[in-house]
Image: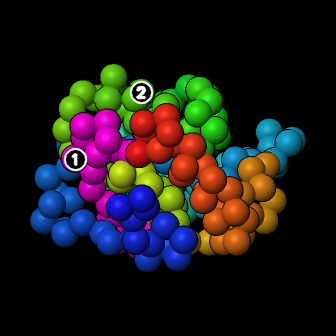
Amino acid sequence: MLYARGSFSGNYIPSDPAELAQGNYIIGHEFAAPPEGWEDREQGWGPVNQEIAEIIVTRFADKPIYAASTVARALRHIAPELELAGVFKDTSSDTTGSKGGTWSELEQARLLAGEGRPVHVGHAYHAARIAMQSQKMGLEPLLPDGLPSSFDAESAQWWCRSPWQWALREVPGVLYLRYLGQI
């Protein structure tokens, strides 16, 4: 299978709730990097990362949390008392093979948290690829239901602004990640 169901529709297959309870730790994956000048905005992490952080706080605050920097900023704003187990270096730049991106987030999480069953909290359109890459890395990924499927028209990452732009970048990006052995 080249790519999992739901990758272009946001209709991923969530894990069974009993399995989610067995997750060892949470990974908060960034989606839609904030635009230039985000530091001057009240919500500099963007609405999708806000939704991701809210899911983590309301459903998974009892587990160790590792998060991309924008999700971590949102988490600190929503729940300043919440301690994070780790914050990933580099902003996300998926499907480029750069220092950032999902693969880097997974490498950092595995380095910090070890092997296990991470619960991935990210974007619904991104969820299938996150799970595939996590499996490729030797982890046992878990996906909760209700991940956000909205896009951010102001994102610095043009591919996170709409479903068709996501597909336009994701198709060649997945082929490239497959070439790199990351899927």
Percent position (x, y) of residue 132? 36, 51
- Report which quarter residue 133 is drawn in: top left
Residue at the (50%, 39%) spot, across then down: 179
Q: Nearer the viewer, residue 147 or 136?
A: 136
**Three-letter amino acid code at the position of disc 1:** Glu
Check disc 1 and report the residue beneath it: 140
Quadrant in the picture for the C terminus: top left
Query: Are there few (<14), some (14-19), or many (20+) residues within 10 Å of tag 1?
Result: some
Q: Examine the residues drawn in magenta and state their main secondary structure.
A: loop
Q: Quadrant of the N terminus?
A: bottom left
Q: Which residues are magenta?
A: 133-147
Image height of 124 relative to 117, above or below: below
Residue 4 visible in the shown view: yes
- 80, above or below 32, in the image: above
Mark number displayed over residue 108: 2
- Tag 2: residue type? Gln
In front: 6, or 116?
Answer: 6
* Horizontal and vertical percent position of residue 164: 70, 72
How far apart are the alpha carbons under marks 1 and 2?
Answer: 16 Å
Residue occupying the point 42% across, 36% down: 181
For the point 50% across and 59% down, which residue is it? 126
Q: Is label 1 in a helix, a strand or a loop?
A: loop
Q: State which quadrant residue 5 falls in.
A: bottom left
On whether residue 135 falls in the magenta region, the answer is yes
Q: Nearer the viewer, residue 78 or 166?
A: 166
